[in-house]
Image: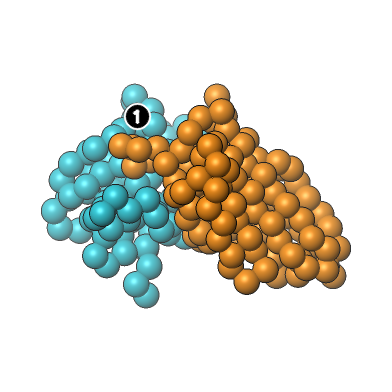
Chain colours: A cyan, B orange
Amino acid sequence: NAGVMQNPRHLVRRRGQEARLRCSPMKGHSHVYWYRQLPEEGLKFMVYLQKENIIDESGMPKERFSAEFPKEGPSILRIQQVVRGDSAAYFCASSPGRGGSYEQYFGPGTRLTVT
Amino acid sequence: TQLLEQSPQFLSIQEGENLTVYCNSSSVFSSLQWYRQEPGEGPVLLVTVVTGGEVKKLKRLTFQFGDARKDSSLHITAAQPGDTGLYLCAGGRQGAQKLVFGQGTRLTINP
């Protein structure tokens, strides 16, 4: 499977716990984006990363949320001390990043449920 | 603030009919993508348009980017039940990699 991979597909956490969402971009893609989708809504941008760098985090909540894309391994979106309002589908997308490509390819998402 | 407005939000029609979905903004975009999303899955890229006035066809689907690059439309000819899904438009701006999404059009094609 050469597509964007996300795991887990479903994650249940109790209030106050930590959630870690993982994303492996498509082969050859060096740019990763995280989006959040609430029920019956479109996707909202959260953060854009390249290897070892956060390029744009204008959509990230100021507290409890962080993201990284290390030199080796997948990108991680981390949510500390989750609250019920964090329940949503979180999607990762990747793009080649060359030649001004605008096309982003999405993974299947992680559905986070906070109980 | 919703920068991209899609209409209609919901559309239910019979198999064989034609339909058009609109994506409008007061802002100019450098590119516009259309995605289709199935329940429980991620959005799948259908097309990217980058030039004002551009028209692209994908089988029974026709995509158009407005001359001023502020709006786009998706026209489906002879809709089939397999076209059922959530259609999302997303705009990209020069110098910014993030996409701005519309709220989606939920399309149902009845057999």
Q: Is residue B22 above or below residue B62?
A: above
Q: Amino acid at mark 1?
A: Ser
Q: Is residue B47 left or right of residue B24?
A: left
Given the current orientation, which residue lies at the most extreme bottom position? A1
SS for callout 1? loop
Residue at 22% x, 38% y is A54
Dot 1: chain letter: A
Between A15 and B40, the residue placed more toward the observer is: B40
The quadrant of the image that shows the N terminus of chain B is top right
Q: Is residue A15 above or below residue A69?
A: above
Q: Is residue B12 left or right of residue A88?
A: right
Name the spot of residue A7 as percent of width and height, x first: 38, 59
The image quadrant that residue B76 belongs to is: bottom right
Residue at 59% x, 65% y is B57
Residue at 61% x, 37% y is B24
Mark 1 crowdedness (10 Å alpha carbons): few <14, some 14-19, many ≥20: few
Which residue has dot 1 on it?
A58
**Residue A86 makes an appearance in the image:** no
Between A28 and B66, the residue placed more toward the observer is: B66
**Residue B82 makes an appearance in the image:** yes
Name the spot of residue A82 as percent of width and height, x first: 42, 35
Name the spot of residue B35 as percent of width and height, x first: 54, 55
The quadrant of the image that shows the C terminus of chain B is bottom right
